[in-house]
Amino acid sequence: MSSKTLTRMDLSEAVFREVGLSRNESAQLVESVLSLMSEALVRGEQVKISSFGTFSVRGKTERVGRNPKTGEEVPILPRRVLTFRPSHLMKDRVAEGNRG
């Protein structure tokens, strides 16, 4: 399995090659899309990308955790966490990559 990371620059370069926008316009487009997604998630909305998956924010309640070294109980404050649920198509594509 490759350890390469897909970056914003990679995405904007792909838009440049595939769509034909200038490099600057491609970078602005990628930034706009990521900004819209981020803003929606901050507002607590879901971001669903067909055939890819759904990003959503979930609230976690306060709970008691333990320090693994000392065993001391420590309160874990309530917080919001980002979750991603891949579509069935994406799960299938990833699984096919495991066979190759």
Image (cartoon, helix red, strand yellow):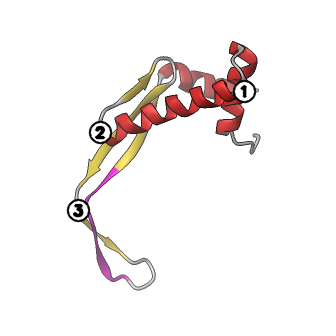
Tag 2 or tag 3, which sits nearer the N-term? 2
**Residue at image coords 69%, 17%:** 21
Label 1: state its secondary structure.
Answer: helix
**Residues in magenta, as a range:** 71-80
Cα–Cα span, label 2 and label 1:
30 Å
Q: Name the residue carrying label 2.
A: 43
User: Label 3, label 2: how many angstroms apart (C-alpha)?
Assistant: 21 Å
Disc 3 or disc 2, which is closer to the eye? 2
Residue marked by disc 1: 23
Question: Number of labelled discs?
Answer: 3
Element class at badge 3:
loop
Residue 26: x and y in percent read 65, 25
Where's the C terminus, which quadrant? top right
Name the disc covering residue 11, or none. none
Q: Can you tell which quarter of the image residue 29 is in?
A: top right
Residue drawn 72% across and 14% down? Answer: 20
Residue found at the very far bottom of the displayed protein: 70
Residue 94 vs 57, above or below: the answer is above
In the rendered view, tell whether residue 64 sits above or below residue 30. below
Please say if the residues under marks 3 and 2 sit with CB atoms less than 8 Å apart. no
Look at mark 3 in the image and give the residue it sits on: 62
Name which of mark 2 and mark 1 comes first in the sequence. Answer: 1
Q: Nearer the viewer, residue 20 or 47?
A: 20
